[in-house]
Image (cartoon, coloured by chain):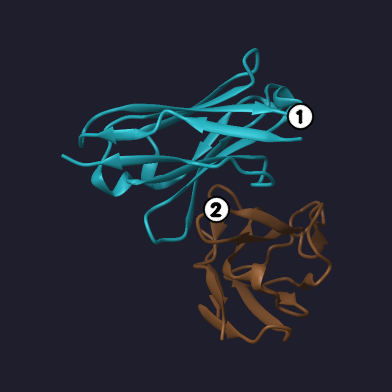
Amino acid sequence: DVVMTQSPLSLPVTLGQPASISCRSSQSLVYSDGNTYLNWFQQRPGQSPRRLIYKVSNRDSGVPDRFSGSGSGTDFTLKISRVEAEDVGVYYCMQGTHWPPVTFGQGTKVEIK
Amino acid sequence: EVQLVESGGGLVKPGGSLRLSCAASGFTFSNAWMSWVRQAPGKGLEWLGHIKSKTDGGTTDCAAPVKGRFTISRDDSKNTLYLQMNSLKTEDTAVYYCATGMAGRWGQGTLVTVSS
């Protein structure tokens, strides 16, 4: 199984400041079709997860442009350019290249300092 | 608008069974691969499995911890996804979510508690 490792696991941030979460996979996530199936999810307190980014860097509909995804191969990053109060929650990366199983990172808890 | 509504959760004793449903609307359900994901209390997300669309074979893949105990099925005439859970264990206690494809859209989840 592909292991997804996120860091940090806890991220205190100041409102208006940038934030960055790293996600590393135990093997390359490039699929035979040339795509890289790495997604990012946000789970606000008490809510269901919501996909923010798909295939490394594509924002889902309605996702603010302060969220961006980047990376390739085994190293990926989710960046929030200026953190807002509504960004508090847990963020997960997920790989959909090598399945079964689809695997998630452990989650990174973003909180306001 | 895509909507996924899970139901069927509740309290069940160890060794018991439960069937979860996920009613879908707002998209062409029959064309969609569908997934189940769970989240134990205070824990992260765990993929349970998915079912392909009939045109892609309609087959299922399940995660090792639930293989042989959980079965995923679909009824395209009812736009509904199912998760049949047998031989439940206390460690199956979690919120169970259905999701479209590779987790593009999620339902609100349904809580399953396995306890004596």
> Is residue B15 or residue A15 the one in the foreground?
A15
Q: CA distance from mark 2 to mark 1?
A: 22 Å
Residue A65, disc:
none
Residue sitting nearer the eye, B18 or A2: B18
Secondary structure under badge 1? Answer: loop
Marked residue chain, label 1: B
User: Which quadrant of the figure has residue A27?
Assistant: bottom right
Front-lying residue, A28 or B85: B85
Seen as rendered, the residue at the extreme left is B116
Q: Give the number of the mark in front: 2 or 1.
A: 2
Q: Amino acid at mark 1?
A: Phe
Rendering coords of residue A34 (x, y %): 82, 57
The residue depicted at 55 percent of the width and 60 percent of the height is: A104
Q: Residue at x 28, y 35 (%)?
A: B11
- Measured as percent of width and height from the top left, residue B13 is found at 20, 34
Q: Where does the image place residue A110, in percent across and percent down from the top left?
A: 57, 75
Residue kind at label 2, given as amino acid type: Gln
User: Which chain is drawn using brown?
Assistant: A
Q: Count the marks: how many?
A: 2
Around disc 1, counting alpha carbons within 10 Å, would you say few (fewer than 14), some (14 to 19), or many (20 or more)?
A: few
For mark 2, give the secondary structure: loop
Read off the residue under disc 2: A47
Which residue matches tag 1? B27
Give residue A18's quadrant in the image: bottom right
Q: Residue A61's x, y, as percent?
A: 82, 52
> What colour do you see for chain B?
cyan
The residue furthest top is B77
Crowdedness near tag 2: few (<14), some (14–19) or many (≥20) residues, C-alpha within 10 Å: few
Which of these two is toward me, B101 or B109?
B109
- Left or right for B52, reference A7: right
